[in-house]
Amino acid sequence: MNSSKKNSVLKSLAKLLRENSANIISENKKDLELCDRRDLALFDRLKIDESKVKSMIACVENAMNEEDNVGKTLYKFQHENGLQIENRIVPFGKIFIIYESRPDVTIEASVMAFKSGNKIILKGGKEALHSNLFLVKLWHKALISNNISEDFVIYLDVSREKIQEIISENTYKADLIIPRGGDVLIDFVKKNSNIPVLVSGRGNNFLLIDQEADFEMAKSIILNGKSRISVCNALDKIIVDEKLPNLKEKLIELIAFLQENKLKVFGFGSFKNFNLDLEIIEDVSILKEEFLSHKIVILLSDSLENSIEIINENSGGHSAVIVTKNKETALKFQNEVDCGAVYHNASTRFTDGGEFGLSGEIAISTQKLHFRGPLGIHQLTTNKWFISGDGQIR
């Protein structure tokens, strides 16, 4: 399928989304009525409003404007015997994504896969069923109106047991599977799948306040990191360098600032030595936990090396921040912290395909193969060798 045909389908989809905005919101309300509103993170991920529909449309339109790299030559070599050898970009083929809560993924993930030449198999959570089925219905209308088969976008409304069977037997002959959600979902897919797995979704992001930090900047970045609690780029842990000037006064100020902004603040480990009016957690397992809540934990470190070690041992490999005026310290941190996105003086909330100049994202990879961080159109391809000869033998 050439780029013009792909864009024609996407143009139809954007039009259908715009025309059906009220219907999308109406179907989503059916899901929201069944949602436990006490789970603030789930409710936030599940809700579709006019702004969310506009974001879906923007994702589709941005993908239309994205260069289509499928077929592009990455490398050329002419063998001494006359063979013409090229390495070109090709689609994976079929991408299977299993995701939780967020119905906008039904549009965004499919758009990324479609523009990069892939078919996609979708399995959303039952909590978003009404929203997802309606959005897939619009996808199918866009495909059919352009004489393209519906099987470019397949939605599976089946039980957990059936999904286990499908991914273990690879019934749909998928080339890649992406579990986008929490640890339970990711572990389920990794244990049951015979399809190559690309892990996505887990956050548990750390921020280090270095001894040479601009403290007011750090406070601002931390607060922004908790501006949405339901997303994988939210901030969960703050490490404070023990050599920060006026340490105790700064800790008191930081705790008060966070509490004033409705965050549940906890100290960890050696924090208890400061005798602050704060609940102290000593169980080290808390450092590996992704909160998806208003909870945030502060801990102390005696060196940059120790801070890096703490992050590499406990974070989800997603995003990490250092706040410092020292560029050499920042560079050491960015080089040695083992995360997909490493920040100097900026919020983890920027780890997002759109914010990184991609047209959107299918997921944020927290592993090193085959790409890392936000996965957009150009990351959903692989390569193939094309060799032309006239009878050469070796």
Image (spheres, rainbow, N blue to C red):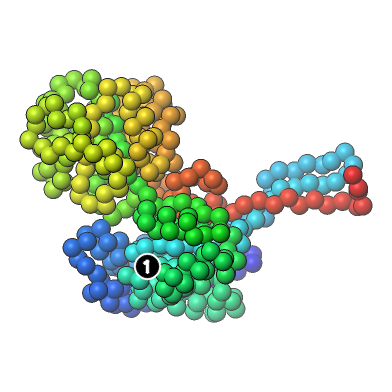
Query: Would you say 159 lies left or right of 271 here?
Result: right
Q: Is residue 190 above or below residue 277?
A: below
Please state which of residues 193 and 104 is positioned toward the viewer in this rendering: 193
Please state which of residues 161 and 287 is positioned toward the viewer in this rendering: 161
Please state which of residues 287 and 45 is positioned toward the viewer in this rendering: 287
* Residue type marked 1: Gly
Query: Would you say 135 lies left or right of 41 here?
Result: right
Percent of width and height locating residue 355:
39, 48
Percent of width and height locating residue 332:
41, 25
Q: Is residue 379 above or below residue 120?
A: above
x 59%, y 76%: residue: 149
x 37%, y 49%: residue: 202
Identify the residue position indicated by label 1 in the image.
Answer: 125
x 32%, y 28%: residue: 307
Query: Would you say 107 lies left or right of 245 here?
Result: right
Residue 41 visible to the viewer? yes
